[in-house]
Image (cartoon, rainbow, N blue to C red):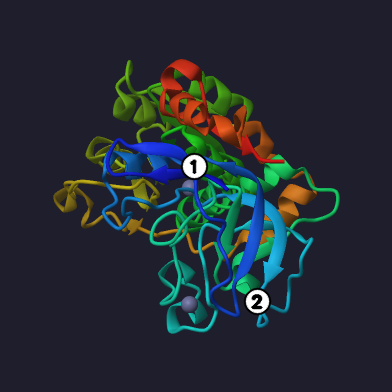
């Protein structure tokens, strides 16, 4: 089968690989019909994720059709159309039973990391019963791909951890796919204002169409002063950090209101100053989280009803055999205006 294989920092190739087979009774073999590329895949290619070894098939997002199931799989059968969660959950270990499936003792984020992933014609999915979701009959398949990772990530790590409430002023720093997913899902809670902060005017324009009420280009403008001016000096109730840089996390600390929540979503590669000298008395909450994908079913219902329309985040489409061009397009988002790319294999 064709698959996108990682060969160490900066190196990837579309190659012929052996078709995966079932290994455990709880596995399913899925024929991938649509997959995508995540910002995390770019981090891997930079060499930021040492758990990914050379020879690994990348990808942790996608949908497909069940080809074969192990004898312990009860909820799925060959022919079923499924969403693959980026988080593999055994549903039995202590962390899974606490709802922290991202730290499943026999799973978590393993696809395209410690086991072969979804940017391929087929993928083996461990713990299939509790790591796959049925696709409703009349669902838009491209929208379903957004349920693998970005929607639950934006919602769980940003909106739920940020405790977004009706009337809140929410700032989202970073208008990439996950920031946009936080923007879409925050609106389920009817916040007052959503201030989108990014350095890319194109992404800011898109965020306005998706529901942001105020925009700040922090490449041009002083984001702290502007945000404080917009909030009459109070700051924001919720600051969602969806970039992963010290400067953007510090921005959150400078604009957070008394009693506010800073919800980190970004993947950080270096330490960040924590300004406790200013914040110790301000009753704020700072949260971190790796997506647990425990809200996928809930989000699937909001997507199915049309209340949530994540398909708007898809900007480019490629056949799987053009995955190398798809990476170039996704990796040059400032020029190509890419948000999510869909790779189709049908
Ligand atoms: Zn992802
Ligand atoms: Zn588990």
Residue neighbourhood size for the residue with mark 2, other residues' Cα within 10 Å, grouped as few (<14), some (14–19), many (≥20)? some
Residue at image position (57%, 33%) is 321
Give the camera-side residue of 119 and 212. Answer: 119
Name the one closer to the observer, 21 or 214: 21
Distance from disc 2 to disc 1, alpha carbons, whole Å, reads 33 Å
Q: Position of residue 78 (x, y in %)?
A: 76, 65
Vertical position of residue 88 compared to residue 180: above or below: below
Residue 52 locus on image (x, y percent): 33, 54
Picture quadrant of residue 29: bottom right
Q: Percent x, y for residue 197? A: 41, 29
| Residue 39 in which image quadrant | top left
Kindly identify the residue that appears in the image at 59 percent across and 44 percent down: 35
The image shows residue 163 at horizontal and vertical percentages of 49, 56
Going from the N terminus, do you reach mark 2 or mark 1 first?
A: 2
Query: Does the image show residue 242?
Result: no
Query: Which residue sits furthest left?
Result: 277
Relative to 94, say whether 243 is above or below. above
Quadrant of the image containing the C terminus: top right
Which residue is the site of mark 1?
A: 178
Residue 93, placed above or below residue 242: below
Within 10 Å of disc 1 (Cα), the crowding (few <14, some 14-19, many 20+) is many
Residue identifier under label 2: 70
Numbered badge on residue 162: none
Indicate the secondary structure of the residue bearing disc 1: helix
């Amino acid at each position: 089968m064709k698959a996108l294989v990682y060969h160490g920092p900066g190196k990837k190739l579309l190659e012929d690989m052996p078709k995966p087979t079932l290994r455990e009774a709880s596995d399913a073999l899925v024929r991938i019909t649509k997959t995508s590329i995540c910002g995390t895949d770019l981090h891997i290619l930079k060499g930021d994720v040492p758990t990914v070894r050379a020879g690994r098939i990348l990808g942790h997002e996608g949908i497909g059709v069940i080809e074969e199931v192990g004898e312990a799989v009860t909820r799925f059968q060959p022919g079923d159309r499924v969403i693959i969660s980026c988080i593999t959950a055994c549903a039995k270990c202590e962390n899974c039973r606490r709802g922290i499936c991202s730290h499943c003792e026999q799973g978590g984020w393993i696809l395209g990391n410690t086991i072969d992933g979804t940017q391929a014609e087929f993928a083996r999915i461990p713990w299939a019963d509790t790591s796959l979701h049925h696709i409703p009959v009349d669902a838009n398949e491209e929208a379903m791909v957004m349920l693998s990772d970005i929607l639950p990530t934006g919602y769980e790590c940003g909106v739920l951890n940020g405790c977004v409430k009706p009337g809140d002023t929410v700032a989202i720093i970073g208008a990439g796919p996950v920031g946009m997913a936080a923007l879409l899902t925050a609106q389920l809670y009817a916040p007052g204002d959503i201030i989108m902060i990014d350095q890319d005017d194109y992404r800011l324009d898109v965020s306005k169409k998706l529901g942001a009420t105020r925009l700040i280009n922090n490449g041009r403008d002083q984001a702290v002063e502007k945000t404080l001016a917009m909030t009459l000096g109070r700051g924001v109730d919720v600051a969602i950090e969806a970039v992963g840089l010290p400067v953007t996390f510090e921005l959150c600390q400078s604009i957070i209101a008394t009693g506010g929540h800073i919800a980190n979503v970004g993947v950080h590669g270096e330490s960040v100053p924590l300004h406790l000298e200013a914040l110790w008395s301000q009753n704020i909450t700072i949260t971190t989280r790796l997506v647990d994908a425990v809200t996928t079913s809930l989000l699937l219902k909001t997507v199915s009803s049309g209340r949530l329309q994540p398909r708007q985040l898809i900007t480019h489409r490629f056949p799987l055999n053009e995955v190398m061009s798809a990476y170039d397009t996704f990796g040059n988002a400032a020029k190509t205006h890419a948000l999510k790319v869909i790779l189709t294999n049908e």
